Image (cartoon, rainbow, N blue to C red):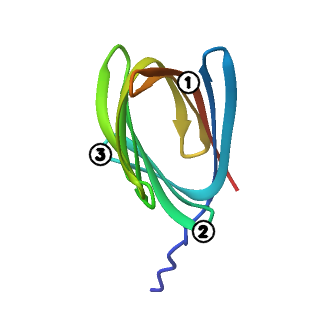
Amino acid sequence: MRLTLKNTDNEYRIKVSNRQTIDSETDTIEETAYGNYTEKNGKQYITYKTENNGDKISSMIKIDGNEILIKRTGSVNSSMTYKVDTKKEFLYHLPYGTVPMEIETQRIVSKLDENGGTIELVYTLTVQGEKYFNDMKITVSKR
């Protein structure tokens, strides 16, 4: 008997688009990478790696019912938890220092399975008293 294991590395295209508004000015940041999608113990996980000006960042998105965790490690380190009608404080670690931030999530819509799908997050990010209004869409598609 011969077993063949399927290599599932980087089988999914992950596109993250975040529209951020402060004082009526809107900016959109997008990143696209190839990564993985898995399900374990009723939770969904998306993992991928990006590079920004030569700095490598690993990202993990965990969907657990009505709560989403986005964790980044590398040149930037953060652990951001999104849960509707909940304020969550966290530290954003950058090469030049640490910045305390707060997320207040207004809406989460997750339509995701092993075939791909989308996650939509609407939230307010507060940084040193400034409020940034965000609309993030994560699109996952099979290659």
C-alpha separation, residue under disc 1 versus residue under disc 3: 30 Å
Report the residue marked by disc 1. Answer: 134
Residue visible at 54% across and 46% down in the picture: 114
Residue drawn at x 70%, y 56% as measured from the top left: 143
Q: Earlier in the sequence, mark 1 or mark 3?
A: 3
The residue type indicated by label 1 comes to: Asn
Q: Nearer the viewer, residue 113 or 36?
A: 36
Q: CA distance from mark 1 to mark 2?
A: 26 Å
Could you tell which of marks 2 and 3 lies nearer the N-terminus?
3
Proximity of marks 2 and 3: CB atoms separated by less than 8 Å: no
Residue kind at label 3, given as amino acid type: Asn
Q: Residue at x 47, y 81 (%)?
A: 3
Q: Give the foreground label among 1 and 3.
A: 1
Front-most of residues 95 and 125: 95
Sort mark 3 into few (<14), some (14-19) or many (20+) by Cα contacts within 10 Å.
few
Q: Nearer the viewer, mark 2 or mark 3?
A: 2
**Observer able to see residue 66:** no
Residue 41: numbered disc: 3
Residue annotated with mark 2: 54
Q: Judging from the image, what secondary structure is the residue with disc 1 in?
A: strand
Q: Mark 1 Cα within 10 Å, few/some/many (few <14, many 20+)?
A: many
- In the displayed structure, 84 sits above or below 63; it is above
